Image (cartoon, grey):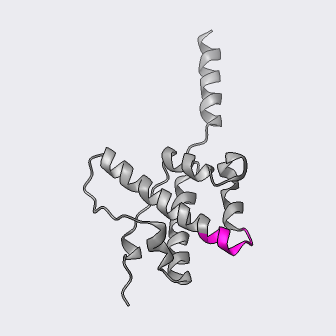
């Protein structure tokens, strides 16, 4: 039986919209605790969180692409659709989404050197 969706075609994006919605899944709406939510021992809760993460991050990708007026093929991802995947397929999709979540959330520029340089420039101008 062929899957209803090609899981390799689903794309993800970590936008502010996605973070706000993912934070709602975390204790105290703290996005820093998202990893903890995924690692719960409650299997049902874990599947729910994986499905929610996949749907939210995919919707964020499509919202951003539409906003930027980029060409993209609309793929509707629903819980009902994800429920038809086997555990291995769902896990593979969740791993991809979480990898994008982590990659997009990494700090690439340190703020401290900028503050230090600004303070030095201000001191020199006085």
Query: Percent position (x, y) of residue 33?
Result: 70, 54
- Residue at 28% across / 63% down in the picture? 73
Q: Is residue 111 above or below residue 10?
A: above
User: Residue at 30% across / 61% down in the picture?
Assistant: 74
As for residue 45 lying within the magenta part, the answer is yes
- Is the residue 45 above or below the residue 105 in the image? below
Which residue of the protein is positioned furthest toward the bottom in this rendering? 1
Q: Farthest right residue?
A: 41
Could you say where residue 115 lies in the image, as x and y percent from the top left?
63, 29
Give the image quarter of residue 7.
bottom left
Q: Quadrant of residue 68?
A: top left
Q: Is 25 covered by the magenta stretch?
A: no
Q: Is residue 108 visible?
A: no
Quadrant where the image shows the N terminus: bottom left
Name which residue lies at 28% across and 59% down. 72
Magenta range: 40-47
Residue at the outermost top position = 126
Specify whether 13 is left or right of 28.
left
Camera sees residue 111: yes
Image quadrant holding the C terminus, namely top right
The image quarter in which residue 117 lies: top right
- Give 85 or 57, whichever is nearer the viewer: 85
Q: Position of residue 34 (x, y in %)?
A: 66, 57
Q: How many marks?
A: 0
Q: Nearer the viewer, residue 82 or 10?
A: 82
Judged by its main secondary structure, the magenta piece is helix
Residue 100 location (% of width, % of height) = 51, 61
């Amino acid at each position: 039986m062929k899957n209803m969706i090609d899981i390799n075609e689903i794309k993800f994006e970590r936008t502010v919209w996605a973070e706000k919605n993912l934070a709602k899944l975390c204790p105290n709406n703290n996005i820093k605790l998202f990893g903890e939510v995924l690692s719960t021992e409650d299997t049902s809760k874990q599947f729910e969180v994986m499905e929610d993460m996949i749907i939210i991050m995919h919707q964020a990708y499509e919202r951003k692409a539409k906003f930027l007026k980029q060409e993209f093929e609309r793929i509707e991802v629903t819980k009902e659709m994800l429920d038809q995947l086997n555990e291995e397929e769902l896990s593979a999709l969740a791993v991809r989404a979480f990898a994008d979540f982590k990659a997009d959330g990494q700090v690439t520029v340190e703020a401290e050197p900028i503050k230090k340089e600004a303070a030095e420039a201000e001191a020199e101008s006085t």
